[in-house]
Image (cartoon, rainbow, N blue to C red):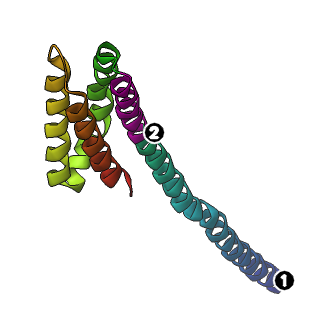
Amino acid sequence: MNRFNQVFFITAISMLTLIGCNNSEQSTTQTSPSATSTPASATSQKTATTTVKDNNFKGLLTVVSNTQTAVKAGDFTKAKQEFGKFEDSWSKVEDGVKKKSSKTYNAIEDEADKIKGDLKASTPNQDKVLAALQSLNTNINSVAKP
């Protein structure tokens, strides 16, 4: 009987050891999917950031386009109103633009100031404002691309 207890004890320990080894393999397998989900969430976060950035540039370009349309129509009151929205849209992207290209950032700032000044004139020069708006549009498009 004593011999039976020893065999039973050794068998029980062996079984527990096997079960313990099997559980650690399952743990490794179970953590693996969460490890692969991290890059996926990082990718989706990057995509979301890119989408927001694209929408901010679209908003900025829309302001410029609406201002151009008003200037072409000779409606400088509407042009001032539309361009008044520029700063709000610009503030959402200007830090990124500055990091990407300080030269383009400075050009956009200068053009925006020039347009504001030109639109404040009692009789703005339509050709001058349109040229500045076109230059501004070109500079924004150059930094809006990834």
Q: Vertical placement of 109 versus 38: above or below? A: above
- In x, y percent, where is residue 86? 29, 28
Q: Position of residue 136 (x, y in %)?
A: 26, 42
Q: Which residue is mark 1?
A: 4
Q: Residues within 10 Å of mark 1 (few under 14, many from 20)?
A: few
Q: Is residue 94 left or right of residue 7?
A: left
Q: Is 59 covered by the magenta stretch?
A: yes
Pick whichever, 143 or 129, lies toward us.
129
Separation of marks 1 and 2 at Cα, in angstroms: 77 Å
Q: Secondary structure at mark 1?
A: helix
Q: Which mark is residue 130?
A: none
Most foreground residue, 111 or 57: 111
- State whether residue 43 is above or below residue 26: above
Q: Secondary structure at mark 2?
A: helix
Q: Which residues are magenta?
A: 56-73
Q: On the image, numbered disc 2 is attached to which residue?
A: 55
| Amino acid type, residue under disc 2 in the picture | Asn
Residue at 77% across, 75% down: 12
Residue at image location 14% in from the left, 31% down from the top: 113
Quadrant where the C terminus sits is bottom left
Q: Residue at x 50, y 46 (%)?
A: 48
